[in-house]
């Protein structure tokens, strides 16, 4: 566990975190990567069955680490990191095998009009949850075939499992856009980020119970990974838990002509960048397919 403080004059956002990762009980290597930096915490899941999945997830981590020299993560910094990761992954593709790719889910420490905010973002089916006032809410929305079918009112088949509709790299022709949510921060907030090695093995009810039972973020992360392994551990599993322990804002800087965000989570949904009909079909693990 470590503590970090992001601050500017009269604005302070202090957090502590815990992180755990495991290759699981079936796969022989771990394609997940994680980052806990000055202003950003994230989980990246290299696409299983694709060449160099671990290279892709590490490229995502490196790109966001390069943006961690400032106190706050900004939309411009987020976009630069995604563009850089896309370029590096494209260069690693080579001529043989399926193009490498990665999901990403993260939370940045952000400030708007002198107030601390969580900036949550995702590409793919790695997830972000928020525990606030004892209630757990999934913030991110999966970019997956299953989610698309459910959104359309259908019933997803087992064949749709592990098919994702958006990724960084994976042979896409241009940098991908992340969905983003900006949420006002409050002391006691707990954000949990995970690869699908947790969410496909462990129910939301057990996730909530574990996050409530363990007050230390490192203990919570360790226990959630342990729960995924106990449930079968069929995939790499990575968990990052981030707690808000001090939130101090300065709303005096807010101009009457300035837009601001507040209240319930705000989602910015972008269209998938996968062209119709384009598909990548690995032999196992995550798959990327156009909808």
Image (cartoon, grey):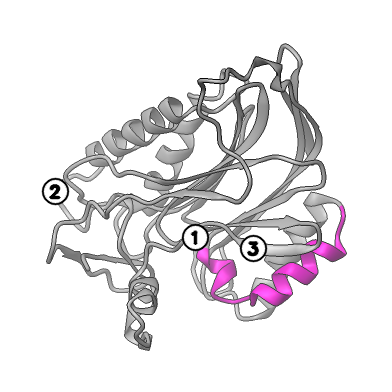
Main secondary-structure element of the magenta-colored stretch: helix
**Residue 144 in the image: above or below residue 257:** below
| Rendered view: 208 above or below 150 | above
Q: CA distance from mark 2 to mark 3?
A: 42 Å
Q: Position of residue 137 (x, y in %)?
A: 64, 63
Q: Is residue 151 magenta?
A: no
Q: What residue do we see at 39% from left, 45% from top?
A: 178
Q: Nearer the viewer, residue 154 or 197?
A: 154
Quarter that holds the N terminus: top right
Q: Looking at the rendered structure, which numbered label has been put on residue 137?
A: 3
Q: Which element is circle 1 on?
A: loop
Label 2 vs label 3, nearer the camera: 3
Mark 1 or mark 3, which is nearer the start of the sequence? 1
Q: Earlier in the sequence, mark 2 or mark 3?
A: 2
Q: Sequence order check: which comes first, mark 1 or mark 2? A: 1
Query: What residue sits 50% from the left and 27% below the top?
Result: 74
Q: Which residues are magenta?
A: 196-215
**How crowded is the residue under tag 1: few (<14 C-alpha within 10 Å), some, or many (20+)?**
few
Q: Secondary structure at mark 3?
A: strand
The residue beneath circle 1 is 29
Residue annotated with mark 2: 95
Q: Position of residue 129 (x, y in %)?
A: 62, 58
Alpha carbons under labels 3 and 1: distance apart? 31 Å
In x, y percent, where is residue 11? 73, 20
């Amino acid at each position: 566990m470590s503590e970090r403080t992001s601050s500017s004059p009269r604005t302070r956002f202090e957090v502590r975190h815990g992180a755990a990762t495991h290759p699981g009980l079936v796969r022989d290597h771990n394609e997940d990567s994680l980052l806990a930096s000055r202003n950003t915490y994230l989980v990246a899941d290299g696409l299983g069955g694709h060449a160099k999945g671990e290279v892709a997830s590490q490229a995502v981590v490196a790109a966001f680490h390069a943006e961690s020299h400032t106190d706050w993560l900004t939309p411009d910094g987020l976009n630069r990191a995604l563009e850089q990761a896309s370029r590096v992954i494209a260069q690693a593709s080579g001529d043989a095998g399926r193009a490498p790719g990665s999901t990403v889910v993260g939370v940045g420490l952000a400030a708007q009009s002198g107030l601390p905010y969580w900036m949550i973002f995702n590409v793919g089916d790695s997830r972000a949850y928020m525990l606030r006032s004892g209630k757990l809410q999934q913030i991110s929305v999966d970019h997956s075939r299953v989610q698309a079918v459910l959104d359309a009112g259908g019933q997803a088949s087992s064949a749709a499992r592990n098919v994702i509709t958006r990724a960084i790299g994976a042979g896409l022709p241009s940098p991908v856009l992340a969905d983003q949510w900006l949420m006002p921060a409050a002391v006691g907030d707990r954000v949990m980020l995970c690869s699908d090695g947790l969410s496909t093995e462990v129910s939301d009810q057990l996730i909530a119970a574990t996050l409530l039972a363990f007050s230390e973020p490192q203990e919570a992360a360790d226990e959630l990974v342990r729960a995924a392994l106990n449930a079968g551990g069929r995939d790499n599993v990575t968990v990052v838990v981030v707690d808000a322990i001090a939130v101090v804002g300065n709303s005096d800087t807010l101009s009457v002509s300035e837009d601001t965000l507040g209240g319930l989570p705000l989602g910015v949904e972008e269209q998938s960048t996968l062209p119709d009909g384009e598909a990548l079909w690995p032999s196992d693990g995550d798959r990327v397919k156009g909808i």
